[in-house]
Image (cartoon, grey):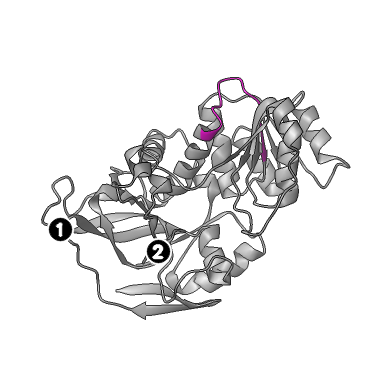
């Protein structure tokens, strides 16, 4: 089979490898589509450290082609989405349903202490507990189950109720999924702040009640508050930069939550006033990865067309196109790029 291996910082090598065979409790999936994520981008550029060679790619869906002897739920030919977060199901976190915080943190092609070869390949081996049936859903649509599940996890961390105001800083693919996830729980109004004209327009099309161009105003915080008719219950940062995290916190009302969703650099620091946290009861909440429950819910929402995915897809590319795709991401060209590993 063909697989795109990260062999060094800034180096992708499309290789011929042996097709994997499943262990007793695993399935082998022929990949139909795999989204390119900022995590893949950071691995490629060395800003997320991984041992090489390894095959990235963790937002995927495809067809089961081989089934381990102990697997009863799935058969060859089943169409599935792949949850890349592999829990041990034995540690205290897993037993409490917090599978994303597993002490033996393992991911198929994604960010974790242990990273297994991922889905920038024609075939990938997966524990049978990490796939969900997708019926007739397209592989491209199903490949968004993983980032959507991450968004659902973020929404769950802030206890957003119907009628709660939300401000989202950043309208990249994940910001636009968060927008739709918050709409699904009844958040209103939802204000989106975004520099790019096309992304800002798409946010409006996908249901943002108001949008703000932070470059066009002298004070983005005041502009967001005006658009929301005051501070919001939830301020969401979906970029990963200290200034925008501070913006999200600045628009959060007393008693509200500031959600840090974008991935900051490991050495990033923000100034926090303990008195303000005490007096205003504003809490910072983090959102890392997804749980098994989040993934199942994401697939269900996609199956029932509660999330618009087509507007997020920029193009489909092959394994050989990954370096160029990472360059386009660096230049903020397009939204979601999707790899189709095989010509079949």
In the rendered structure, which disc, 2 or 1, sits on the residue that comes first in sequence? 1
Overall secondary structure of the magenta section:
loop
Rendered view: 223 above or below 262:
above
Q: Is residue 141 visible?
A: no
Give the residues drawn in magenta, as a range: 157-168
Position of 342 with respect to 276 (left or right) is left
Image quadrant occupied by the C terminus: bottom left
Q: Which residue lies under the disc numbered 1?
A: 24
Q: Is residue 36 visible?
A: yes
| Residue in the picture at 48% in, 69% down | 50
Q: Are marks 2 and 1 in contact (CB under 8 Å)?
A: no
Quadrant in the picture for residue 132: top left
Q: Which residue lies under the disc numbered 2?
A: 115
* Front-lying residue, 310 or 123: 123
Quadrant in the picture for residue 106: bottom left
Badge 1: residue crowd in 10 Å (few <14, some 14–19, many ≥20) = few
Residue 177 at x, y percent in the picture: 54, 41
| Residue in the picture at 80% in, 28% down | 226
């Amino acid at each position: 089979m063909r697989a795109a291996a990260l062999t060094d910082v800034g180096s992708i090598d499309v290789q011929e490898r042996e097709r994997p065979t499943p262990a007793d409790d695993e399935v082998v999936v022929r990949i139909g589509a795999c989204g390119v994520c900022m995590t893949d981008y950071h691995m490629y550029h060395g800003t997320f450290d991984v041992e090489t060679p390894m095959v990235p790619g963790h937002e995927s869906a495809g067809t089961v082609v081989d089934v381990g002897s102990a697997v009863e739920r799935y058969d060859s030919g089943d169409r599935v989405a792949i949850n890349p977060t592999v829990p041990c199901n034995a540690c205290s976190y897993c037993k409490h349903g917090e599978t994303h915080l597993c002490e033996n943190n393992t991911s198929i092609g994604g960010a974790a202490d242990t990273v297994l070869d991922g889905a920038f390949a024609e075939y990938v081996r997966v524990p049978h507990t990490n796939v969900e049936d997708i019926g007739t859903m397209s592989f491209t649509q199903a490949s968004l189950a993983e980032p959507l599940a991450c968004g659902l996890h973020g929404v769950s961390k802030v206890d957003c109720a119907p009628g709660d105001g939300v401000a989202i800083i950043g309208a990249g693919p994940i910001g636009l999924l968060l927008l739709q996830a918050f709409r699904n729980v009844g958040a209103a109004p939802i204000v989106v702040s975004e520099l790019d004209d096309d992304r800002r327009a798409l946010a409006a099309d996908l249901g943002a009640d108001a949008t703000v161009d932070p470059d066009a105003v002298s004070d983005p915080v005041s502009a967001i508050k005006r658009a929301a008719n005051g501070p919001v219950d939830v301020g969401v940062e979906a970029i990963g930069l200290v200034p925008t995290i501070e913006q999200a916190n600045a628009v959060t009302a007393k008693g509200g939550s500031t959600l840090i969703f974008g991935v900051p650099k490991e050495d990033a620091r923000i100034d926090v006033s303990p008195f303000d946290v005490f007096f205003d009861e504003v809490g910072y909440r983090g959102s890392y990865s997804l749980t098994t429950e989040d993934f199942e819910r994401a697939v269900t929402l996609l199956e029932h067309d509660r999330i618009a995915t087509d507007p997020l897809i920029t193009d489909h590319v092959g394994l050989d196109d990954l370096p160029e795709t990472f360059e386009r991401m660096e230049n903020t060209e397009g939204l979601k790029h999707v790899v189709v590993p095989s010509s079949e």
